[in-house]
């Protein structure tokens, strides 16, 4: 199981919000501590090539971001203080998802310990997202002929608005987002399939909807590659979430996704997405069980 590591020295500083940056380093430690992963499973990515970013982002936006020339208005929407370290982190984070996707092609499943930056549009960033890691990696696989039909399953509690915009005109990428209707982004984009849930939806209703829709998505689009954004801000404990999943419900959610991929022998790259429960241990447990479930599922179907 290959996992792109997020080097802690490049962690950016949030501008206005408390953003749990510590979780990325702690998650690695937790995975090692529980014996879910070995040190050799982790790789530290290089920086992504600019040409690869241009597959999903406008060159002018990328150049402004990398050159630290973003307009004030864009910077505020992103929510991070812009710095060279932030740029470096983003460039390695995206490469981690690209390399992870290539690992998934041979190993069936791979992870990015960070990523899931689905609010990044082709020409701007917002909501803590600057470059859309899974969108760039999806476009990269298509460009290199490594995948022909891609399904993006975005189960973060917030809509994958940037991803929806980036692939709006590309039928070979099917974007699916299941999210809280009453949550950010308040003006939503149109994914190929959106399920907008009312506030407070719990395990039973959530899992019923997801297990009903997944077979249809695979049947309809016939993907040969899946990207999974596994944000754990669907938890009842989440500060920003507005849904009410338990940890067990969140684990079942992950199981449904990995089983759908494994049963059909479709490789999957998974990025972590959001998670803002007040106790860091809850966030870590939820993210950790995503790795554990993937391991269990892919062992069964090996
Ligand atoms: Zn989120």
Image (cartoon, helix red, strand yellow):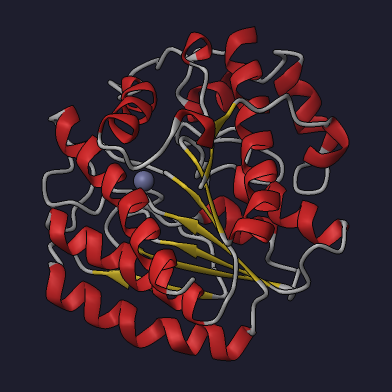
Q: Could you tell whether 170 is left or right of 77 in the image?
A: right
In this orientation, does residue 4 appear?
no
Instruction: Give residue 177's quadrant in the image.
Output: bottom left
Quick one: 123 or 90, which is closer to the camera?
90
> Which residue corresponds to the image point at 51% horizontal and 28% vertical from the top-left?
78
> Which residue corresponds to the image point at 68% horizontal and 58% vertical from the top-left?
106
Instruction: Give residue 265's quadrant in the image.
Output: bottom right
Q: Position of residue 66 (x, y in %)?
A: 74, 19
Q: Could you tell whether 215 is left or right of 202 in the image?
A: right
Instruction: Give residue 73's quadrant in the image.
Output: top right
Q: Is residue 135 above or below residue 33?
A: below
> Which residue corresponds to the image point at 45% horizontal and 24% vertical from the top-left?
79
Quick one: 34 or 49, which is closer to the camera?
34
Q: Position of residue 286 (x, y in %)?
A: 23, 46
Q: Could you tell whether 231 is left or right of 77 in the image?
A: left
Quick one: 250 or 3, which is closer to the camera?
3
Q: Position of residue 236 (x, y in %)?
A: 12, 51
Q: Is residue 57 above or below residue 107?
A: above
> Which residue corresponds to the image point at 43% horizontal and 81% vertical from the top-left?
214
């Amino acid at each position: 199981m290959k996992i792109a590591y997020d080097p802690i020295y490049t962690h950016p500083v949030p501008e206005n919000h408390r953003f749990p940056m510590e979780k990325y380093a702690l998650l690695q430690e937790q995975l090692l501590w529980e014996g879910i992963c070995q040190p050799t499973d982790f790789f530290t990515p290089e920086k992504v090539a600019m040409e690869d970013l241009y597959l999903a982002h406008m060159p002018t936006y990328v150049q402004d971001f990398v050159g630290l020339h973003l307009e004030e208005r864009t910077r505020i929407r992103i929510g991070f203080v812009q710095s060279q370290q932030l740029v470096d982190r983003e460039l390695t984070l995206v490469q981690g998802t690209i390399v992870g996707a290539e690992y998934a092609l041979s190993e069936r499943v791979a992870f990015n310990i960070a990523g899931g930056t689905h609010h990044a549009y082709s020409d701007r960033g917002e909501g803590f997202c600057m470059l859309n890691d899974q969108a760039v990696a999806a476009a990269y696989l298509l460009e290199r002929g490594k995948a022909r039909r891609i399904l993006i399953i975005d189960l973060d509690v917030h809509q994958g608005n940037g991803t929806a915009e980036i692939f709006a005109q590309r039928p070979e990428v099917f974007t699916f987002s299941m999210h809280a209707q009453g949550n950010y982004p308040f003006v939503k984009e149109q994914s190929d399939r959106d399920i907008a849930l009312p506030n407070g939806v719990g395990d039973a209703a959530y899992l019923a909807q997801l297990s009903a829709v997944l077979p249809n998505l695979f049947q309809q689009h016939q993907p040969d590659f899946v990207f999974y954004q596994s944000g754990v801000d669907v938890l009842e404990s989440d500060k920003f979430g507005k849904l009410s999943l338990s940890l067990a419900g969140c684990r079942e959610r992950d199981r449904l996704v990995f089983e759908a991929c494994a049963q059909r022998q479709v490789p999957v790259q998974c990025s972590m997405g959001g998670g803002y429960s007040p106790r860091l241990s809850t966030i870590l447990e939820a993210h950790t069980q995503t790795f554990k479930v993937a391991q269990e599922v892919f062992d069964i179907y090996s």
